[in-house]
């Protein structure tokens, strides 16, 4: 294929606006996959993705399409739809020259549409707006067209109205890809310059890196170098994705495909890295950054005897997902475990679900937290920690206030789109979460778009649910309400003892909540009338065994499920 006849593009959309359905239709139309019912959403490979109906890992496919007598190679780079994966979205976008921005004809522009639009806009890509689901009864494509014009400044006549479900107008989308998206600007005669925009791990073949070639050619047997790690590898296999891997002799600049080169885990093929020939070093492509985990949680085996199994499962899963970070950790209550870092809450849930489904491991996940920074107050402390500011990913390691001049926390710019009758309530909710308003505009007659700067910690767990329910009366003093809730849960889970137990929540030395578990002795023989000694013995033995399952903290024996109830997030 001459470069003139190649197009590299992505589909971006708010969750559920129909990105995967459109991708399936494009694959069918170009004969890449058969038109059978089993093909539903071929690009969503993982079981979790199918179950949750969300795309987690980007998948890529090369399509062949004939337009006005010319054969084109269209490389479709599928991107994840959820906010947690915006880093994956932006790195896949860097392999493209254009995007299809899919908007649901019924729901209109949503927050993720806006976020994705700006990622594509900043990458200076051609943007083709596609209004999907025009077959729906309540579809209002004209209103959506106007929103697109107002918010993104794209003339309404550029919108293509389709039904991905029925296939209506999907052919026009392919024609627009050819007409409106430019071919990649590449040089085949220059030395190799390949962008790694995704990578997966195969148990038998090692790391499979998805690459977009900006310059040059790569073939089997070439010696290549990773610009990030400076490690050298020999290429074992190159090929295209149709959407399954199909080996080819070479990959040329302008093409998108895969490469296998004896890399042992995905950290060796980091997203955004540049690969070049050992003989011909080049300047790496700009914009590389390692994925930064923003949500941390403790993970422990439900039973400590499961520790080694869980360890190997976590290791295997992280081979596949370089954005998860792992630190060993231990807790007085839960034993040995890890503190894991994730891109966001959904990422964490997906990881947990994959552990359960693919490795049959059951774990306790503690309430997620965000990383904080503490700026140290004295030269002595700076020397001790060997840093001016320290990053805290574990609440148990929070340094004392006396050592710190300032604490820093991550903030995010959030977009909220709401019917205008809820604007007041939404604004109150944002203020209660310490958010600072940055912008407010009407995107049509009765929809408002708000932009706020949020402390990440305030929104990471339950903000979306609160926003959806907009229930009033949330507490401003969160420490107090959280403390009370934990004490209440503990009180319910602790068995009564021979003495009274005070359950207290404290911030520093200040007690902010208290519950009392009354004294009581459980008499297992109470139901045992008469003198059957063997039965009595049996019951006493069972009670003794039950005690083994308890853990002693001070004078109190705490059942394991009490920890789980208190620390579990769901
Ligand atoms: P993520 O993978 O989470 O980003 O979602 P998505 O954007 O890929 O959405 P998906 O293709 O899974 O579609 C979401 C739902 O909308 C599915 O139930 C589809 O069947 C439905 N859907 C998609 N396109 C159309 C359409 O044109 N008309 C109608 N009526 N429904 C559609």
Image (cartoon, grey):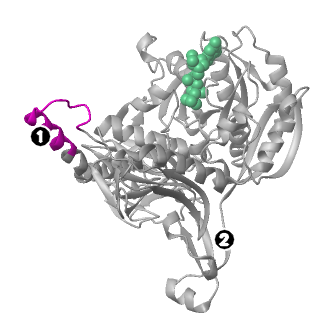
Distance from label 1 to label 2 (Cα)?
A: 59 Å
Q: Residue at x 80, y 39 (%)?
A: 426
Q: Position of residue 266 (x, y in %)?
A: 38, 52
- Residue 200 lies, with reference to residue 286, above or below; the image says above
- Based on the picture, tell me whether residue 540 belongs to the magenta stretch: yes
Q: Nearer the viewer, mark 1 or mark 2?
A: 1
Q: Which mark is residue 407?
A: 2
Which residue matches tag 1?
A: 537
Residue 538 figure quarter:
top left
- Residue 551 lies, with reference to residue 210, above or below; the image says below
- SS at badge 2: strand
Of 16 and 432, the residue lying toward us: 432
Q: Residue at x 51, y 52 (%)?
A: 516
- Based on the picture, tell me whether residue 565 belongs to the magenta stretch: no
Q: Residue at x 34, y 34 (%)?
A: 357
**Residue extent of the magenta highlight:** 525-543
Q: Position of residue 415 (x, y in %)?
A: 75, 42
Q: Residue furthest bottom?
A: 380
- Residue 307 lies, with reference to residue 392, above or below; the image says above
- Residue 32 lies, with reference to residue 217, above or below; the image says above
Q: Residue furthest right?
A: 445
Q: Residues within 10 Å of mark 2 (few under 14, many from 20)?
A: some
Question: Mark 1 or mark 2: which comes first in sequence?
Answer: 2
């Amino acid at each position: 294929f001459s470069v003139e006849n190649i197009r590299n593009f992505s589909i971006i959309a708010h969750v559920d606006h129909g990105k995967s359905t459109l991708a399936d239709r494009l694959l069918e139309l170009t004969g890449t996959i058969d038109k059978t019912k089993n093909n539903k959403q071929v690009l969503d490979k993982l079981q979790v993705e199918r179950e949750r109906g969300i795309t987690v890992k980007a998948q890529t496919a090369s399509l062949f399409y004939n337009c006005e007598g010319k054969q084109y190679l269209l490389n479709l780079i599928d991107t994840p739809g959820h906010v947690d994966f915006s880093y994956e979205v932006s790195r896949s976008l860097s392999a493209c020259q254009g995007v299809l921005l899919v908007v649901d004809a019924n729901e209109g522009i949503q927050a993720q549409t806006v976020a994705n639009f700006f990622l594509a806009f900043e990458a200076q890509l051609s943007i083709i707006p596609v209004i999907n689901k025009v077959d729906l009864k309540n579809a209002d494509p004209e209103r959506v067209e106007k929103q697109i014009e107002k918010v993104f400044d794209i003339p309404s006549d550029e919108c293509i109205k389709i039904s991905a479900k029925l296939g209506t107008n999907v052919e026009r989308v392919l024609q627009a890809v050819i007409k409106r998206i430019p071919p990649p600007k590449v040089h085949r005669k220059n030395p190799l310059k390949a962008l790694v925009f995704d990578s997966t791990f195969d148990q038998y073949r090692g790391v499979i890196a998805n690459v977009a070639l900006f310059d040059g050619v790569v073939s089997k047997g070439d010696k290549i170098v990773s610009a990030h790690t400076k490690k050298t590898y020999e290429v074992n296999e190159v090929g295209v994705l149709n959407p399954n891997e199909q080996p080819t002799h070479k990959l040329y600049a302008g093409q998108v495909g895969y490469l296998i080169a004896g890399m042992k885990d995905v950290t060796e093929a980091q997203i955004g890295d540049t690969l070049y020939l050992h003989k011909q070093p080049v300047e790496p492509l700009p914009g590389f950054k390692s994925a930064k985990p923003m949500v941390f949680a403790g993970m422990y085996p439900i039973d400590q005897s499961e520790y080694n199994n869980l360890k190997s499962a976590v290791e295997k899963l992280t081979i596949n997902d370089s954005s998860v970070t792992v630190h060993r950790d231990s807790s007085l209550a839960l034993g040995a475990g890890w503190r894991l870092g994730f891109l966001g809450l959904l990422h964490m849930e997906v990881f947990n679900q994959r552990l359960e489904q693919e490795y049959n491991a059951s774990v306790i996940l503690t309430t997620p937290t965000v990383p904080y920074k503490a700026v140290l107050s004295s030269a002595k402390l700076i020397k001790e920690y060997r840093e001016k500011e320290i990053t805290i990913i574990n609440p148990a390691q929070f340094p004392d206030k006396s050592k710190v001049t300032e604490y820093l926390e991550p903030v995010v710019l959030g977009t909220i789109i709401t019917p205008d009758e809820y604007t007041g309530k939404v604004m109150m909710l944002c203020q209660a979460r310490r958010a600072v308003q940055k912008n407010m505009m009407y995107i049509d007659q009765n929809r408002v778009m708000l932009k706020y700067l949020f402390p990440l910690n305030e929104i990471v767990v339950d903000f979306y649910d609160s926003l959806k329910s907009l229930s009033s009366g949330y507490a401003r003093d969160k420490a107090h309400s959280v403390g009370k809730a934990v004490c209440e849960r503990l009180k319910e889970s602790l068995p009564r003892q021979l003495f009274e137990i005070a359950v207290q929540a404290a911030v520093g030395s200040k007690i902010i909540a208290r519950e009392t578990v009354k004294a009581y002795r459980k008499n297992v023989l109470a139901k045992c009338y008469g003198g059957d000694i063997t039965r009595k013995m049996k019951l006493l033995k069972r009670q003794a065994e039950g005690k083994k399952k308890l853990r002693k903290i001070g004078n109190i024996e705490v059942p394991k499920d009490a920890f789980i109830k208190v620390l579990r997030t769901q």
